[in-house]
Amino acid sequence: MPPLVHHVLAGAILLGALVGLVSYVTLLERKFAARMQSRIGPYYVGWPHGWLQPIADGIKLALKEDVVPDAADRWVYNLAPLAFLVPCVLIFATIPFAPGLGVADLNIGVLFFLAVSSLEIVGLFMGGWGSNNKYALISAMRAVNQIISYDLPFIFAALVPVVLTGSLRLSAIVEAQRGLFGWHVFAFGVIGPLAFLAFLVATLAAENRVPFDILEAESELVAGFRVEYSGMKFALIQLAEYAHMIGTSFLGALLFLGGWLGPGSQHVLVGALWFLLKAMVVFLVVTWVRWSFVRIRVDQILAISWKLLLPLTLVLLMATAFVVALRGAAGA
Amino acid sequence: MRDGASFLGETWQLVGAVRRAMAVTLRNLFRRPVTVQYPTVKRVYPDRFRGILALTYDRETGEENCIGCRLCEMICPPQVIKVEMLKAEKRNFARTFTLELYSCEFCELCVQVCPTDAIIMLKTFDLATADRRELLLDKDRLHALGLQHQPSWATGNRLRDMQAPPTPAKAEAKAEGAAAAAGGKTEAKEPAE
Amino acid sequence: MADAEARHVVEIGYGGNERLVMNMGPQHPSAHGVFRAILTLEGETVIAVDAVIGYLHRCHEKLAENLTYVQYPSIASKTDYVAAMTAELTYVSAVEKVGKIDVPRRAQYLRVLVAELQRIASHCLWLGTWCMDMGGALGGGATVFLYAIREREMILDLFEALTGARLLYGFHQVGGVRYDLPAGWTEQCRRTMDFVAGRIDEYEAMLEDNAFFLVRAQGVGVISRDLALDVGVCGPLIRGSGIGYDVRRTEPYSSYGDFDFKVPVEMAGDCYARYRVRMVEFRESIKIVRQVLDGLPEGPISSRPGVKSVGQVRIPKGEGYTRIEGARGELGCYLVADGGAKPYRLKWRGASFSNLAVLPHIIPGCKIADVVAIMGSVDPVFGEVDR
């Protein structure tokens, strides 16, 4: 079929699968969190164990009244969920689920991912500003501070596997992790684990997850920049947040945990399954951290970023480059 | 400026603290949840559970226990009980007995003062309704509730006995007094102020 | 409204020219009840706070003038509804003091028993809500909250077996207590104490040494020793600021003198110090409960007969004040009796009311996130504040 139709179809399938995946990941998180808190989580909707809960939530949000505050800046307020959603969904374009299974395996895949995922801040700030609500505004200010500060360590930590591989193409990075301990998380003794750890911490902060969720801080700012949104717009914001969360889990699995590699991965579907499994492991670790700690103040968050994570990731990146150059000089 | 050793030491301490906290959460992941899936599963209520109120019948004769003495009405702090006495030859009854359950505090004082153990509390609280008027319990409703559900251990006489355990002489006098209670002896000492 | 001169404003030389007045309103996830704090912000820093209370005023003191000494103890529990036993104890102690009524030994020991159990339950709630305020309802704070409530539910099960109610008991009466221990209760109590002691170790493992927790709690909301004495805070606040004042030690009531327990004192005066004080109080309360269970004497549970009529208790003319160490501090009741069955005048001294007075001194200068941490460590209950 003509390539345009092929691409549109691939994109549509990906979008549909993404929405389904995001919904059920919220259910996974709720059950996981509930079990850690000695309770059960969703149970009765879609008895047993709440299998229909995400669908019920989605229907409820779609049917809710769309409330726009009287003094809100209408254009900014209404466009903010879209401006927040589009970058968060666009990052999935470059992710290869298995060899050949992906929408577009760009040869600047990592760069595209990192660049586009940073655009979500615009949508976030638009939401906070357009709501004409002091809580939302404070939250938006904190968000801009925090996400910008943490994007730098995030990028540097993500660049470590790139340097180890020598390519920005995501499928090439995965291919370079063949072998028993070939995963980049085990690279060169301490560099790989440290880089993965820094990546996880930066992910927590870039996703506004506790302990870095000061921007939505339910106990201070109720819901942060989302406070004035209800109904379908709120659903879009939730979708975008969780999609971004899963996207960075996918990236972590690709960059550090070997992507689709695993026993039996010559079959495309088995490879894709391994990939999803590893991404869910990353997601669950992040969720586990989320439900174990209290949050810290915004100035402390920024201090950690600028004084701890950024120097650490810079040093890691330089060490990686040094080690790769040595290996190349020795091998060549 | 911190020296390198203390920075590493602090980082190591942070790692240890993170590990400890996450270990607690992980341990709880594998514990059984404490949720009680009401109403499929009901937990066991203790004997003295203070549930909804009800009126009782005498176990031997089948007559209503309530003698209409209005002690419960006078002691109720939010004044939710309204009683009208009906005088009869051998003993008195309550002509009407209204209890506004929506305002009841469940303090058990009415149960405490009742001389004939007429008003009691039950071991259930499940009377949720969408219409508040259904919680305005009249005498028939109260008697019906008393027959439907299990009563709590705490009745007036048992509570009073617990608070001032009777000596043997008092116990005899009480037994005699209970027999004569059908004779309509009202006990109102001080009128309500 | 706030008195403009008494307001304490901290000038931080911001450089920006926007002061934002933000309302942390009576409906707020971490208002601990109904508390309105009007914050003046410059950037992220609070420079002044106007506190508005009174949203829960229910005229307790007037109500007490219309209810007899037999009826009011059930209502007294609704002042400090989180620690209802100590609230009732304050009222009946005041009545007994003015009326010179003895309380039998067993009743005194039972009062100590329930007061200490109530202290443990109240501190469980404090820990849970404080961590939830600091950590978010969707986050680690909620985890600590659910663990703490799980343990509190066990203690409430004990109370339910004893009185029949879980939150507001009506356990005390003038001259003693209303309920005696049912069969099997002491074994259940001992088991619960062992279990809770083990769980407190878990909470400490989660929070102690945890850098995330420490940066939120250390150095935040420092109440200096002089400030504590000037403003008149009480309870864990004053013990966290270096002054070892505990009513159970200075004026032992209800045979507290028979028990051996430590009064924890910390010097730092910040949220972490108050946290340490309350964690030690957890364990000390467990110790006292065990001592009471070991040494519980036999005897009547009340020096007055059981309640048979509403006007049964008449107190001769007199007035008096009693103070009790509640979970939040010094709870006091001043009673004026005129010889009838109802008090002439009743005045509650709410522990949280005096504790809240320190907020305008310590909040300005800190960040918004610190406001909730400080509120949580002050642990107000608005039933006590507004009565």
Image (tube, helix red, strand yellow):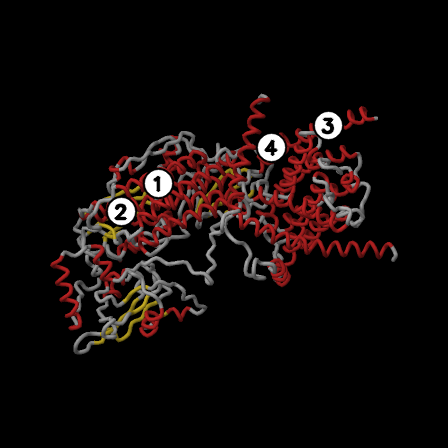
For the residues carrying marks 1 and 4, which lies nearer the camera in this image?
1
Residues tagged 3 and 4 counted as in contact (Cβ below 8 A): no
Q: For mark 2, what is the residue? A: C110
Q: Chain of mark 1?
A: C
Give the image location of residue A39, x and y in percent.
Answer: 50, 52
Provide residue C186's location: percent of width, then percent of height: 31, 47
Which-is-in-front pick, marks 2 and 4? 2
Report which quarter residue A155 is drawn in: top right
* Secondary structure type for disc 1: helix
Label number found at residue A318: 3
Residue labelled with disc 4? A303
How far is disc 1 from disc 2 in space, using C-alphas? 14 Å
Q: CA distance from mark 1 to mark 3?
A: 55 Å
Is residue B186 left or right of C65 when viewed as pictured?
left
- Give, as a three-letter code, the residue at label 1: Ile
| Residue A37 marker | none
Instruction: Identify the mark nearer the N-term, 3 or 4.
Output: 4
Q: Are marks 1 and 2 on the same chain?
A: yes
- Categorize mark 2 by other alpha carbons within 10 Å: few (<14), some (14-19), many (20+): many
Return the mark for residue C286: 1
Badge 2 sits on which subunit? C
User: In the image, is C113 to the left or to the right of A74?
Assistant: left
User: Which residue corresponds to the image point at 49% horizontal and 50% vertical from the top-left?
Assistant: B32
* Residue appearing at x 57%, y 49% in the figure: A32
Q: Nearer the viewer, residue C37 or C325?
A: C325
Q: Residues within 10 Å of mark 3 (few under 14, many from 20)?
A: some
